[in-house]
């Protein structure tokens, strides 16, 4: 299925995260300015494959630390890999929200994180999980 099936709108994310939306989910200019940022896994709405999401998602960045989402590019392969990724993509590359990862992992819409759970704890929890649809298929 395409990533678009799992993505929440910016309006919904603003409702969930308020003022913390930009600072918590959007990849910083500082991070995108690093030479290695060109190698990050970035996907768009039409992509159907991501890198593995682990419990350290959002904590460290490297090419296999879990895919990032482009808010403006339909396919990750179309993301311009330029020497100054910050100048090209500032504000347009973000982490997947934990709620989106629940959807990707096959959890039902009724599943919610405990109220007040920190963002890092949410990523850790889902990163230590398995895809519900895959387990259902194997069982």
Image: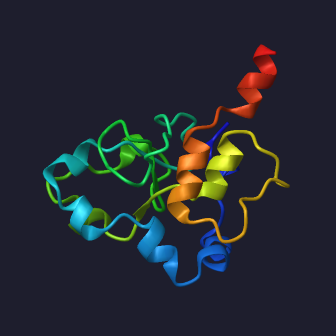
Give percent across and percent down for residue 58.
42, 54
Residue situated in front as seen by the camera: 85 or 133 = 133
Give percent across and percent down for residue 138.
76, 15
> Looking at the image, which residue is at 52% across and 75% down?
21
Residue reaching furthest to the bottom: 19
Give percent across and percent down for residue 3.
61, 45
Residue 80 visible within the image: yes
Looking at the picture, does residue 132 appear above or below residue 26?
above
Residue reaching furthest to the right: 110
> Looking at the image, which residue is at 54% across and 63% down?
119
| In-image side of 22 versus 102 (left or right) | left
> Looking at the image, which residue is at 46% across and 70% down?
24
Q: Which quarter of the figure is the C terminus placed in?
A: top right
Give percent across and percent down for residue 123.
54, 52
> Looking at the image, which residue is at 85% across and 55% down?
110
| In-image side of 30 versus 135 (left or right) | left
Residue 7 visible within the image: no
Number of labels in the image equals: 0
Q: How is the image coloured?
A: rainbow
Residue situated in front as seen by the camera: 79 or 131 = 131
The quadrant holding residue 40 is top left
């Amino acid at each position: 299925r395409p990533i678009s099936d799992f993505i929440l709108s910016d309006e919904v994310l603003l409702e969930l995260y308020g003022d913390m939306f930009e600072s918590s989910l959007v990849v910083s200019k500082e991070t995108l300015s690093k030479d290695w940022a060109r190698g990050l896994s970035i996907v768009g709405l039409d992509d159907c494959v991501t890198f593995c999401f682990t419990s350290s998602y959002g904590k460290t960045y490297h090419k296999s630390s879990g895919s990032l989402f482009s808010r403006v590019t339909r396919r990750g392969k179309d993301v311009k890999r330029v020497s100054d990724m910050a100048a090209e993509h500032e504000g347009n590359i973000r982490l997947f929200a934990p709620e989106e990862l629940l959807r990707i992992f096959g959890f039902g819409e009724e599943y919610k994180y405990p109220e007040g759970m920190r963002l890092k704890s949410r990523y850790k929890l889902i990163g230590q999980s398995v895809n519900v649809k895959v387990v259902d298929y194997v069982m």
